[in-house]
Amino acid sequence: MNTFLAYIADNLGAIGIALAQHIGIVAAALALAVPVGIAAGIALAHARSRAARTAVFYLLGLGQTIPSLALLALAVGLLGVGLLPAIVALLLYAILPIARNACTGVQSVPEATRDAARGLGMTNMQIIRRVELPLARPFIIAGLRTATVVTISSCALASLIGAGGLGDFIFSGISLFKPEAMLAGAIPTAMLALAADWFLGRWAARGHAVR
Amino acid sequence: MIAFTNVRKQYEEHAALNGVTLNVEEGTLCVLLGPSGCGKTTLLRTVNRLVEPTSGTITVNGRDIRNENPVELRRRIGYAIQSVGLFPHRTVAENIATTPDLLGMPRARVNARVDELLGMMKLDPARYRGRYPAELSGGEAQRVGVARALAADPPILLMDEPFGAVDPINRAAIRSEFLELQRRLRKTILFVSHDVQEAILLADRITLMRNGSIEQQGTPAEVVASPASPFVEEFFGGDRQMLLLETLRAADAATPAALHAGAPTIAESSSLRDALLRLLADGAPSVTVLDADGTALGGVTIDTIQRQLAARGEAQ
Amino acid sequence: MSFLQFLHEYDTSLLIALAEHVRMIAIALAIATLAGVPLGVWGARNRRAGGIVLAFANVIQTIPSIALFGLMIPVLALVNRGIGTFPAIIALVLYALLPIIRNTMVSLLAIPHATLDAARGLGMTEGEIFRHVMLPLALPGIVSGIRIAATMSVGVAAVAAFIGAGGMGHFILRGIQTTWPMMTIAGAVGNALLALIVELLLEWVERALTPRGVRIGAERSA
């Protein structure tokens, strides 16, 4: 216990930087994944062919079953080590749940509601912005929640391909068998994921109340 | 026969049944009528011990049900409910065969029984036997629900709004088919309803409930003609005179004196309400009631109808 | 060296890694199913307890896998089991519990009240209701939970290579450590393929276990 506290005290600055890096990588990946994912989800929900819609939706789900470590490893194999391949892999991975949920959300809008909006003279863009997006909001937030937790988790693995972040402490702790380093990385990572999940969960619940 | 003696059911703060005493005679159909929350469903569910009363006694054919194994008791009592509760993973035939199978009836007999019941319910066995509940319309599902309740040929049936979830046209058809069936089978039936028309059509006796107590009981004619309280009067609403006419058989009121040549005719089973509607529709002075062979039993005029109402204190 | 040559060269060790990987997952899933299904049944009967169990499993699920290892190793090291398959299987079981418990609970609670009331009213015993009504109707949902747990386990088991549990993750780790992309890619592709195969296989099992009448109902309402 004392070793642990001493380690924390000695490395407080480095842990802070790693935490900031971690959040930065997650934010960068999500900043791109959210607009792309939502747009893709809306486009998918409006796809003409029902068969294509079902197939793409299914493939997005199948993509989510690919382990994040495998995806990161592929990125390093194809793009080399560093920050960029890590962000690319995390970004691609985060798009999947966001797109799927946005698609489900838009599809949950009753046809009668859409019809009424059209009858009131809204253009297709207006229907998307003023009717579909507000109604799909709880679904979109749920997708964002999944994506955020998954990205925080995968980002801890991204340290392995040289992206930095809290994973650095966990991995060096494991390879040197220094429990204090493991904990110094693992505790903030776990807290970060739990906090994001809790925060977005509350936001989603509020979205439901508005509905 | 089902006999309730001072049955009470207390749920924490709320009394669902407030000391109910009621007899349902063998071979009769008793409708438990009342607004939602009056305790009628709770009372029904005490009979097969889905609800255990807080106090009081219930006997079925003279035996106190507290001394019976609930599972065996339920297998001897038919049970049909509004939402039907068909098993979605079982075919129509398997659904109907539930209780016979539980009782260990031989396969061949069960199959024959399933076909017999489907026929009784006016569903072609060859077409319906292998279907799943998801492939049935609401009316078909309710018919299967009733067939399932009758499957083990129980002398007693509990029915909780069994025709509630069908559209009005199909409901009328299922009701009259069921009434015909009951005239043949003479089961002892406890039937929950909130529909006055349904109660008057089906019931030998009506038990009107309110807040866990019996407000009034009697034959449909008695209850409609002489409501015991303002609540009962209000429950039957402004249509009470029409309802009363519905409880009276035209054949009982018809007289030879009222026979007119060339008058429109109605069947022996018709009510005085049917007679009145016929008089109004045809603008005729009289209708003739015919029996099954086409023999005239007598005539009914507006005057006959007024006298019938007057005799029950309803003419103004 | 081409990729095919690589696969040929390392075929035995790849197969051994695959076997280690599958073994870890199978053991963990067996334990998680044996524990999770009863917990789910209990949770469906006792909603308060169910809520607590779910909330607890949800917290564990949210903790990133590598962080969970980082938290577990120092504790398990006290009994000298910090490294290897033992902590890996414990972590896999903990992760697999949530989807299994949740799906069991949800599938049981989704059975219409009228169906259960009818079963009881027709004179089925509690055991018969469970066997003939609840289990067949809830089974596809339970298997769906096992499927979600299984695909997730493939990924977590890969991470477990870092704590010396072996498996396909070992190739990824070695490839990165020795900057040999081919080895990394071999591990990654193998890992991804395994996840997809597990997913498709259990999807098939789930469909096969869905009663025909229920499938027809789902198609009609779709």
Image: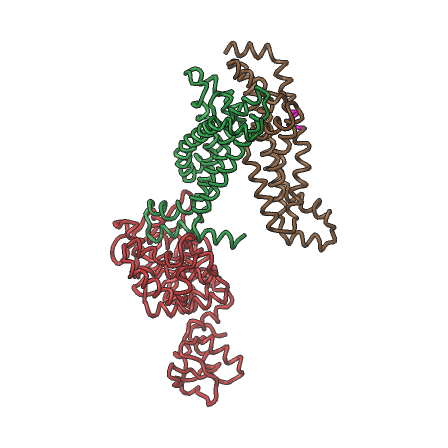
Q: Position of residue A208 (x, y in %)?
A: 60, 41
Location of residue B58 with respect to B184 vertically, above or below: above
Q: What's the magenta region?
A: A23-27
The answer to which of A40 and B124 lies nearer the viewer is A40
| Magenta stretch: helix, strand or loop mostly | helix
User: Residue at (52%, 9%) from the top-left corner?
Assistant: A3
Task: Tell whether C204 sits left or right of B152.
Answer: right
- Give the camera-side residue of B127 and B43: B127
Instruction: Residue A24: say if magenta.
Output: yes
Q: Residue furthest bottom?
A: B261
Colour assigned to chain C in the rendering is green
**What color was chain A assigned in the picture?**
brown
Residue B3 rendering spot, x and y as whole percentages:
30, 57
Query: Is the residue C205 above or below the residue C29 in the image?
Result: below
Q: Residue C127: image x %, image y %?
A: 33, 44
In the rendered image, the quadrant that contains the C terminus of chain A is top right
Whether residue B224 sits left or right of residue A134 in the image: it is left
Compared with A59, A155 (above or below) is above
Task: Determine if residue C59 is in view.
Answer: no
Depicted C39 relative to depicted B2: above or below: above
Quadrant of residue C31 within the rendered picture: top left
Q: Quadrant of residue B229?
A: bottom left
Is C47 colored magenta in this rendering? no
Count every numbered label the image shows and give the total.
0
Colour setting: by chain
Q: How far from the left and from the top, in percent, is residue A37?
A: 65, 38
Q: Nearer the viewer, residue C2 or B118?
A: C2
Which residue is rendered at x = 63% and y = 34% of the image? A92
Task: Write down which chain is painted red.
Answer: B
Whether residue C186 is visible to the viewer of this picture, yes or no, is: yes
